Amino acid sequence: MKISLPLNSIMQKSDFIFGVATASFQIEGGVDSRLPCIWDTFCQTPNKIRDNSDGSVACDHINLWQQDVDLIDSLNVDAYRFSISWPRVINAEGELNQQGVDFYIGLLDKLIAKGIKPYVTLYHWDLPQHLEDKGGWLNRDTAYKFRDYADLISKALGNRVTSYATLNEPFCSAYLGYEAGIHAPGIKGREFGKKAAHHLLLAHGLAMQVLQKNCPDALNGIVLNFTPCYPASDSTADRNASSIADAHFNQWYIKPLFDKCYPDVIETLPAIERPDILDGDMEIIAQPLDFMGVNFYTRAVYQACTYHQFKQIEVPDVPHTDIGWEIYPKALTELLVSLNDIYQLPPLYITENGAAMDDKMVNAAVNDEGRIQYYHQHLNAVNDAIEAGVNVKGYFAWSLMDNFEWAEGYLKRFGIIYVDYQTQQRTLKNSGKAYREFISKRS
Ligand code: IFM
């Protein structure tokens, strides 16, 4: 199977960016050369990570980064999206840790020397533990600490960075980390999620002000994840249920960026669940964006439920990836078209898209046909959205290589490169070959 798009498609756009993506905690390892973060603590808490693993070695990228950049280069991609580990570059006193900064300068310089554009995310979930000890994202002051970190690091990296994203997937940090409790720091309770979300969005707005001042030539923005909500039936009750779920899980994070307010469901929240919004906060959050990143993997289907308003259901007999997420590429097209209808969007990038598969190495090869098909379908879905008028300027495959998949540990493999965690040997999967071949066919 090959990845292919129709003629006269995004393949013809010379400025469309194809890339691969990773995140610091998921690949770096090297815990001894940085401060602890909330995921170090969470991994040490019994029964939080399915295989009881942690990020202490991960893909050992901290040592193997040069060969990893060579691998990225061999894929013929235009860009590499990675994140900076806040606890690696800022010490407990809030000053730059030069050793950590030098690691990223080396990485950036090698990428640039190879003609690969660096797309940098400042926060992909690895909050310094000492800030969590003071309340983490439930403490408004963390937003100001994030602004200070963004200021110091963006000055230190100079003009090396093509694009800065402030946050990756604030929904996951807020909801999974401070409401469902299944991600670090593992806090559970409906009264926490929206408060954490507000401070994350405030942190984004404050950091955007700094980035636009320090790096006016970079593309500065934010990366949101979307799981589009569909009703289980055409009934009014199910359609309402699905739209309430959408307001909580998707619109909650995008509406403040463009409309300076939260979705109307805020009015239905009991006082204890409401965020603490101070005068001027919504103006800070709604900074002009140079781009917005969209991370997409799957959709969710909801039906009405008297107790919780909505209930997610499993659709029978549909294809799933190895992590149990339904494969439904049409939702990506529909999502992009609907966001474009609702909001005054800046250019969009698909900053993550990919599939976990039960990969097996056989005779030094990984024949991951299912993943190739996933990429084929989703790239075509992006192309359909562009043809419907959405301004999408790039696409990043998640992920460059297998890595630490959060609460799933190392059990789920998302890479287009296979990682043998015993030897740290990397092997290009067939999907990696297909992606390389696809990109190389561009005119
Ligand atoms: O691995 C994660 C990534 O860190 C954030 N987006 C979703 C991916 C797959 O779960």
Image: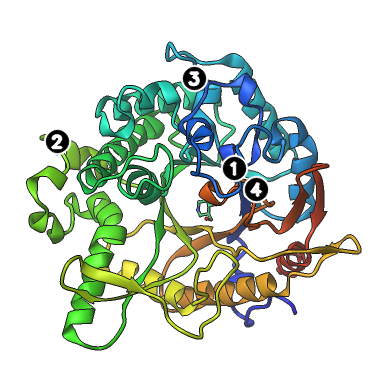
Type of the residue with mark 3: Ile
Type of the residue with mark 1: Asn
Task: Describe the element under mark 3 as helix, strand or loop.
Answer: loop
Nearer the observer, disc 1 or disc 2? Answer: 1
Type of the residue with mark 4: Asn
Give the mark nearer the N terminus: 1 vs 2. 1
Q: Which residue is mark 2?
A: 280
Label 2 – label 4 distance at C-alpha: 40 Å
Type of the residue with mark 2: Gly
For residue 127, which quarter of the picture?
A: top left
Mark 3 Cα within 10 Å, few/some/many (few <14, many 20+)?
A: many
Q: Which residue is mark 1?
A: 52
Nearer the observer, disc 4 or disc 1? Answer: 1
- As drawn, the label of residue 403 is 4
Residue 260: give x, y in percent of width and height. 18, 49
Give the mark nearer the N terminus: 2 vs 4. 2
Point out the residue furthest to the top here: 93
